[in-house]
Amino acid sequence: MSEPGRPDGAPGDPGAPRKAAPEPSGVDLARVALRAAKEAARARGDVAQQKKQARRGGLRSGARGDRRDPMALGAAINRLLTERGWETPAAVGGVMGRWPEIVGEDVAKHCEPERYDEDERVLVVRCDSTAWATNLRLLAPTLVARLNEDLGHGTVRLIKVNGPGGPARRYGPLRAPGSTGPGDTYG
């Protein structure tokens, strides 16, 4: 029935009864184990490659922009200001840099902004003479309106004008004979 040299149940013998496939021998087991190890190593290599790319700055983006792409410097600074809540202090700092443009050259020569109190929304300005301090006090409502127009409504509520700094005041009831008082003007 079967051909010589061909075992019973071989694939070419339709009439022969089929026998169960023999268990893989040592060589076959080694091949199967090697194939599984290669696939596992390949999978681990892919994971390691992805980790390496993530450490180097992530996977490269394609033709379209996404969050991993570099950001323009101006956009990055604006995002930082927004995230930290620094919009108002940064805007007021810009005003201090553009003070001559806002108030005019003559006033800027004699009056300069010192500080901004964000909680009270007060801009403190120092003048070099009492005459200029008085003049700036008269211009204060106009300047507040101009600043709020530039910075946003309600950013500056009040401009506090300080005159020139004089000598240290001597407080107390006793004074040395011949001492001069604080005086009227120092400029």
Image (spheres, rainbow, N blue to C red):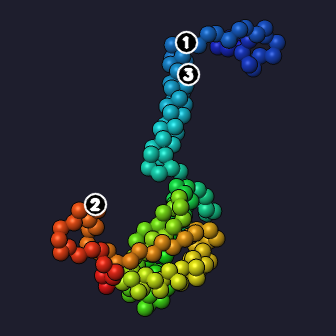
**Cβ–Cβ under 8 Å for marks 3 and 2:** no
Cα–Cα span, label 1 and label 2: 109 Å
Q: Is residue 14 visible?
A: yes
Where does the image place residue 85, in percent across and percent down from the top left? 54, 57
Residue that appears at 59% across and 13% down? 24
Image position of 73 with respect to 42: above or below? below
The local crowd at label 2, few if under 14, some if 14 to 19, many if 20 or more residues have their Cα within 10 Å, is few
For discs 1 and 3, the disc positioned in front in the rendered view: 3
For discs 1 and 2, the disc positioned in front in the rendered view: 2
Residue that appears at 51% across and 43% down? 50
Q: The residue under label 3 is which amino acid type?
A: Val
Task: Quickly name the residue at label 2.
Answer: 172
Q: What is the quadrant of residue 168 in the picture?
A: bottom left
Task: Quickly name the residue at label 3.
Answer: 32
Quadrant of the image containing the C terminus:
bottom left
**Callout 1: SS:** loop
**Cβ–Cβ under 8 Å for marks 1 and 3:** no
Task: Quickly name the residue at label 1.
Answer: 25
**Callout 2: SS:** loop
Cα–Cα span, label 1 and label 3: 11 Å
Q: The residue under label 2 is which amino acid type?
A: Gly
For discs 3 and 2, the disc positioned in front in the rendered view: 2
